[in-house]
Amino acid sequence: PYRKRWGKMKTATEKFEFYSETLKAALEGHAEKHETDVDDILETCNYLARGDLAFVPHYEEPYIWGDEAEYPFVFVDHRSKLNREGRSANCSWYQELRDVDPGDEAWDDVAKINPVDAAKLGLQNGDRIRITSPVGSIECHAKLWEGVRPGAVAKTYGQGHWAYGRLAAEEFGVKARGGNNNEIIPADYDRLSGSSAFSSTTRVKIEKV
């Protein structure tokens, strides 16, 4: 029953394009209109590929915000096994069982740091820390954990609500429970599609509060 749907795709060739003639035509048209060339457009859009490579599936290095000298740690934002699109934080089971995620703590919000890095920063388990990126900063507690490699800091997404509910916030409407990862993640986008470039990341610095 689906055979009649085959072909006639909305592409320049009416086929699935492993080599995208559609994208090529669009970029060439844009380049001609603005008196430039396709490679210049790709460079402006932060793409590394040039020439025909741009029109076939290929790997692009993720764009990382922040200078390594000022922001020495790569920030790893990850989801909890318990996350349900960020709406779980006001559930008692979510807070009580947060330690099902390796390195996390129940009823807390922690940033997981390798003990080697923690020693250099003079940090111990439970210290309150500030994590700062090029776009913002948040506060939470330090957790020394060998599950994260040196040079990186990992933090579960989902905490940092100052309202939302009596369990989500440490003090409803007044004090957040930990930090909201979104406040330190730059709003970056794929320049051609306009979609969120969530695989890009940011560097951060860590200091004891």
Image (tube, helix red, strand yellow):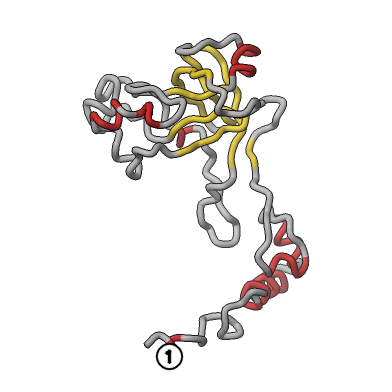
Nearer to the camera, 77 or 125: 125
* Residue on which disc 1 sits: 4
Q: Residue furthest bottom?
A: 4
**Residue 36 coordinates in the image, percent (x, y):** 76, 66
Task: Tell me which amino acid carries mark 1.
Answer: Lys
The N terminus, quarter of image: bottom left
Using a 10 Å C-alpha cutoff, classify the residue at mark 1 as few (fewer than 14 neighbours), some (14 to 19) or many (20 or more).
few
Residue situated in front as seen by the camera: 139 or 37: 139
* Left or right of residue 86, residue 144 in this image: right
Picture coordinates of residue 89 (x, y %)? 30, 33
How many numbered marks are there? Answer: 1
Quick check: 123 above or below 196?
Answer: above
Identify the secondary structure beneath mark 1.
helix
160 sits to left or right of 43: left
**Residue 207 lies in what quarter of the image?**
top right
Residue positioned 49% across, 13% down in the render: 125
Which residue is depicted at the point 31% across and 28% down? 97
Image coordinates of residue 16 in percent, x first then y, are 57, 78
Q: Is residue 209 above or below residue 206?
A: above
In the image, is 127 to the left or to the right of 206?
A: left
Side (left or right) of 92 relative to 63:
left
Residue 154 x, y percent position in the rendering: 52, 30
Q: In the figure, 179 relative to 209: above or below?
A: below
